[in-house]
Image: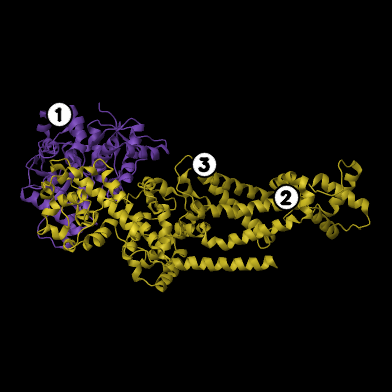
Amino acid sequence: MQKMVAIFLGCNIPVRLKQYEAASRAVLGKLGVELTDIPEFNCCGYPLRNIDRTAFVLSSARNLALAERQGLDILSLCQCGYGTFRMADHLLKTERSLRAEVNRVLSQEGLQYEGKTQIKHLLSVLFHDVGLDAIRKQVIRKFENVKIAVHYGCHVLRPSNVVGFDNPVAPKIFDRLVDVTGAESIDYPTKLDCCGAPLLGTHNRLSLDFAEKKLVDAQKAGAHYIASACPFCQIQFDTVPRRIEFERGLNYRPLASILYPQLLGLTMGLDEMALGLDRNCGDMNFLGQALVGETVAARSNGMESREYEQAV
Amino acid sequence: MVYTISLYASLAIFCFGLLYRVANWFRYRVDQEAETISTSQRVTAAITGLASTLFSIQILVLLRIFLLDVIFQKYFMKMGALRWFAHMCIYLGFILLLLMHALDKIITNSVFEVYYSTLNPFLFLRNLFGFVILLGLGIALYRRLFSPQPQPKSTVVDYSAIAVLGVIMISGVLLEATKITSHTLYQEMVSDYSGLDEADTDSLSALNAYWVENYGLASPGVKRPFDADTLQTGEELHKGSCMECHSPPQWAFMSYGVSRVLRPAALYLDRSNVHTGLWYIHFLACFLGLAYLPFSKFFHMFSTPIHLFIKGITIHGKSKPANLATFQAIELDACVHCGECTRRCSVAVALNEIPNPNILPSEKHAAFRSLLSGRYISKRNLLRIQEGCHICTECRRCTDVCPVGINLEGLWFNLKRHAANLGYPKPEAWARNTIGSDFIITKFNEERLPLSFDDKTFEKEITGHTQVNTFSLCFGCQNCTNACPVVNSHESPRKALGMLPHEIMHCLALRQKELALGSMMLWDCLTCYLCQEQCPQGVCITDILYQLKNLALKRMKQEA
């Protein structure tokens, strides 16, 4: 049994990407990861980073302290949130005066940051805490002939000494997790690059350029879908083709984006509606058709037939 | 005279204020679509909309809202039973006192056959309603001052509302208390209504004794105890001339209690005519409240129910754009400043480090209204609005919790638009457009650049943090610049970006403040951390750029 973790949704997911939350809860539920909601959670501090360093660290630290009060680790669905928490945690552990200032403010509410909370991302929980074997046991059908371009996301990968997610130059977690679903994770030139979301609203043209380049690169490399695990990246990939169409005109069929827990959920036999596939902007029909071999997959995973029937 | 003049003056101000506030509903243009609709179109649409609603099945919706939300204050339940109770006390007590007491000549007199303010049930009810209001005010004040929950800051608006009501209530109670004990008033009444001859001292002192004994009167030169016969005579006289209009003052439990406390000083208070003074304070405070109402927090007693009514019958996409425009303007007035939004605000915690009240939705709401009023707003306040509306993460929690159901998220979207139109867009874009585009590298070619080693604040900001301080480790290999996707996306990056990442590290080492803070590179940084990851020296390049952005924005704010 997994240790209970506090799920951190951030500001975007509950409003603009409900399917990410739904799919993550469904998948984690199947895998036996128990989630706690802390309603007092606030902004992770990421949007404040350009404005004021202390304010960003304070904002992060309040969430960490809230989880710490309940003795919980944090599971972030957002990669920017994950990176921000890690950075704040790092700064609070290295800079004494910052920690004193933050704790001074937190103590007004009876909170305290001690640095005991571990910060995890959905993908790291799936890979390290749940493990590929446990996931395989729940996979009852697999994708066939589906190529996925994974988008790692900058803020989980770098700076690696702070975020400690995976090898920053040759990461493998996301690829391995895609492999479990039977889909093939392909390589493409801009695999580790930025989606452009941080420049949205500041320099829109550049922001569009980066997203478009990734989508085109991945498509050229033969991908059917781009997979993300961050609301910022997902919204960027979902909305950019429409904005490009509006601003520049689109003469190709853009690559659709899917959230990793949706991809995994499909292979676990979860309902498309429960995974919120209808809320994605891109075309998801191809994926449904590519799911095959339910019986084979299930039997090969050593499931009892009765258990299998229940699963389907 | 004073009474009449101040009554009409305050009524006039009240009516003017109401008209002004309502006119604003048709004048303020919140969203872009509203800018194409004229005020007269909006008034016409509102009138036809109102008429068609009143004569349709939707009247039932209005009725339901009236019963549940306006009378029973159901929407307030969201904020917990105590706050609902406190608000219900103030609101019910206020309405009932207004109808029964303040408008007694118009309403109570015509509804009841016999009405004297000194007669039960009016005597008792007036005290009961007053007590209920004071109870509600007490809870409200206690909650604001001592509640353990984190509170949005109470402002002058909140305290002035509590204060005006408090003065009216307390002066009313004191007035009644001093009137109970007043011998002067007693004598006036006796000479007017008792029909007793002034020479009939026995009867007069008997009645006096009865009133001192039973009606709380403070009379000079009278000593208790009285003998039974005198009281008996007094009672008969009382029954004959007074009882018809006077219930026992004990029913006025608050005032009577206060009058007992004041009793030792009662004769002195009566001689100095304090009750007249209190009467002035009482009615002047009422009229002040009346005149102040349309401009105060109390205006919500009109705007909030109207907002709830319209919200109940508005169907987006179906209602007329002109009416939606008016509805949005009403949303700006419907706030009761309960602070629920601020308590749920995702970024409210930042207020501790960035002292700008406009970060909080409850304050930003008021700022939006002042922005639309067309009044002069100082540059400093505009900057605060800009910062406040862009620190917001659009998490929609404020909209979800607003008990009145104001679409706050929609307002924030429009506030950003208005601020941008006034020249205050997203701070990063603003900095990019002003600092970044101003930066021409050739400008610096001919002059010797000043070094900022003696700038103590800058020195502290860049060397005080362990991470930022890493710039001194840079040996100029340019890995960062080569790794940067933004640099690589330009054909001539120096022209587009000013200083490149490795050059910014050099600028810091040489304390070239202007070059480091003025570069376009800061604002075009993706924060992808590729540079920092590639640095063989462990220079925290991205984090340094973050810090420089913080500094540049702070400096821009200070300069503006």
The quarter of the picture where residue A310 lies is: top left
Give x and y (percent) for residue B31: 34, 64
Return the residue at label 3: B146
Return the residue at label 2: B177
Give x and y (percent) for residue B330: 43, 62
Callout 2 touching callout 1 (CB < 8 Å): no
Report the quarter where the N terminus of chain B lies: bottom right
Q: Residues within 10 Å of mark 2 (few under 14, many from 20)?
A: many
Q: Is residue B492 above or below residue A173?
A: below
> In the picture, which chain is yellow?
B
Q: Nearer the viewer, mark 2 or mark 3?
A: 3
Return the residue at label 1: A133
Q: Residues within 10 Å of mark 3 (few under 14, many from 20)?
A: few
Q: Residue at x 26, y 62 (%)?
A: B434
Could one spot residue B120 in this view of the protein? Answer: no
Give x and y (percent) for residue B142: 54, 43
Q: Is residue A188 above or below residue B274?
A: above
Mark sitting earlier along the chain (2/3): 3
